């Protein structure tokens, strides 16, 4: 483990009263170890096993919650920590229980031997209202009860499944490890390529529609996943175009429950008004936890960078990253729509204003540090938007003289496809 040697003899015991939580911000540069000694405790719905050390990487912010009391041990110095007995966990658990009822109902109400669909929950609210955290809890609790719900991540700014700028989904077959995060092996990932939807609203909506279509198709053949339903995480952009995108997501996924986090009266009223014809749609307004950490724009940028770093190097720095070289002729780079960074490239002049127009991009130095997605599209011109991506590479060097591109990849294998997608997402090794 690459964190070896960074721990001191700073082992402390923390006793937690029932229904309280220990909120921790890990130091900016050093990890923290933690384990459960006695009682029962969970991290965002993931039940901690006894006496097993977990190593939380720098900057991670989380809470250890106990329903009936627990003793935990920490090893390391935290940036910030405190215990609180005031949590909205009971109200969150009530929502979970009502979702369980719906899941059971959907398995018993079979039509032509096909179970009806389980609850499709969408969580909306301001930035830092705890949406992703609540999604994790609902998914972990469901998985613990034997269900296999699908997690849908529409938050391109602070993505949870994979790197920022993606619209993705993954089945949750077991509670999600609080350090490693969501598994990627079964994820369906589309690359938007930007961290704000306004860069290309049409494309963002198209990718959301694609994802919804794919999940619908998959769920036909999978009764378990169909009955378990889905939990959809959204962006904290809840006004103007952000609000329109929420309506779009609710309609596209045909959500059955909208959870509004925080005291968002205007948002609730507006959604109820605009969705009044969806008679079966339930609204649940939940309190935001005081433990949710406020993340300013600089911190968000840092988190985005470490999210990309985690993709290449692993959350605990345990992956090998491969530096590889290909000839210009071995790849074809495309972009979807237009965006400022590439407007000087030769291909940009031919593009016009169609936000879904797919254009080949000239390979030159402007690609250095760009994160490109590897698309499975067989015919890029037609399929790039509807195709999922295999993964990502980051361009490190473009040698125009020798016509060679050097990139890093988490895989030693050759690129699974020649088709790469460019957005505005960049990453520099820090
Ligand atoms: N009860 C808690 N105690 C400590 N930290 C918490 C708690 N709840 C959430 N957090 C932390 O607060 C941060 C923000 O929470 P979260 O990501 O769930 O918010 P969000 O509404 O999804 O954010 P955004 O939409 O802005 O991306 C995260 O780092 C999360 O781990």
Image: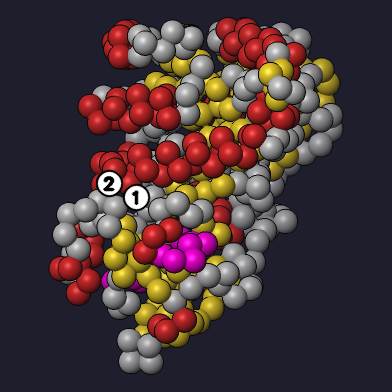
At x 25%, y 31%, the residue is 241
Residue corresponding to mark 1? 194
Instruction: State how the image is colored.
Output: secondary structure
Q: Nearer the viewer, residue 360 or 340?
A: 360
Does dot 1 land on a helix, a strand or a loop? loop
Give residue 137's position: percent from left, percent from top: 62, 23
Tell whether position 327 is magenta: no
Give residue 64's position: percent from left, percent from top: 66, 24
167 vs 271: above or below: below
Q: Quadrant of the C terminus?
A: bottom left
At x 82%, y 26%, the residue is 37
Q: Does the CB distance between marks 1 and 2 fall below 8 Å?
A: yes
At x 51%, y 29%, the residue is 232
392 sits to left or right of 385: right
Give residue 189's position: percent from left, percent from top: 52, 49
252 sits to left or right of 31: left
Q: Earlier in the sequence, mark 1 or mark 2?
A: 1
Residue at the far front: name it. Answer: 112
At x 27%, y 57%, the residue is 357
112 vs 100: above or below: below
Give residue 426's position: percent from left, percent from top: 37, 59
Residue corresponding to mark 2? 200
Tell whether position 374 is magenta: yes
- Depth-wise, is mark 1 or mark 2 nearer the camera? 2
Does dot 2 land on a helix, a strand or a loop? loop
Crowdedness near tag 2: few (<14), some (14–19) or many (≥20) residues, C-alpha within 10 Å: some
Q: Which residues are magenta?
A: 366-380
- Residue 111 visible in the picture: yes
Q: Nearer the viewer, residue 225 or 139?
A: 225
Q: Quadrant of residue 343?
A: bottom left
Q: CA distance from mark 1 to mark 2?
A: 8 Å
């Amino acid at each position: 483990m690459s964190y070896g040697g960074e721990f001191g003899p700073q082992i402390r015991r923390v006793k937690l009263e029932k229904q309280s939580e220990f909120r921790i911000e890990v130091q900016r540069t050093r990890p923290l170890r933690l384990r459960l000694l006695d009682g029962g405790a969970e991290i965002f719905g993931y039940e901690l096993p006894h006496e097993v050390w977990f190593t939380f990487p720098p900057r991670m912010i989380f809470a250890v919650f106990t329903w009936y009391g627990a003793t935990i041990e920490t090893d390391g110095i935290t940036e910030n920590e405190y215990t609180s007995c005031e949590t909205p966990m009971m109200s969150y658990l009530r929502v979970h229980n009502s979702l369980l009822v719906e899941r059971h109902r959907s398995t018993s109400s079979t039509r032509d031997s096909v179970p009806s669909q389980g609850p499709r929950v969408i969580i909306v609210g301001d930035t830092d209202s705890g949406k992703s955290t609540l999604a994790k809890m609902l998914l972990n609790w469901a998985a613990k009860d034997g269900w296999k719900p699908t997690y849908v991540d529409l938050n391109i700014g602070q993505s949870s499944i994979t790197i920022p700028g993606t619209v993705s989904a993954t089945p949750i077959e077991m509670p999600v490890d609080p350090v490693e995060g969501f598994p990627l092996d079964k994820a369906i990932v589309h690359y938007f390529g930007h961290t704000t939807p306004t860069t290309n609203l049409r494309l963002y909506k198209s990718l959301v529609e694609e994802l919804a279509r794919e999940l619908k198709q998959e769920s036909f053949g999978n009764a378990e996943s169909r009955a378990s339903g889905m939990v959809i995480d959204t962006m904290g952009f809840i006004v103007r175009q952000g609000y329109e995108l929420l309506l779009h997501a609710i309609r596209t996924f045909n959500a059955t429950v909208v959870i509004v986090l925080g005291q968002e009266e205007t948002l609730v009223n507006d959604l109820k008004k605009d969705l009044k014809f969806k008679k079966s749609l339930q609204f649940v307004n939940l309190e935001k936890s005081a433990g949710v950490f406020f993340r300013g724009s600089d911190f968000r940028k840092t988190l985005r960078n470490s999210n990309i770093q985690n993709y290449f190097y692993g959350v605990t720095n345990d992956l090998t990253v491969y530096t590889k070289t290909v000839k210009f002729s071995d790849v074809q780079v495309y972009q979807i729509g237009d965006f400022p960074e590439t407007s000087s490239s030769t291909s940009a002049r031919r593009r016009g204003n169609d936000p879904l127009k797919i254009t080949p991009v000239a390979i030159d130095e402007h690609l250095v540090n760009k994160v490109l997605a590897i698309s499975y599209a067989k015919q890029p011109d037609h399929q790039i938007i509807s195709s999922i991506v295999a993964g990502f590479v980051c361009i490190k060097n473009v040698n125009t003289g020798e016509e060679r591109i050097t990139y890093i990849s988490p895989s030693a294998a050759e690129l699974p496809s020649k088709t790469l997608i460019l957005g505005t997402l960049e990453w520099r090794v820090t």
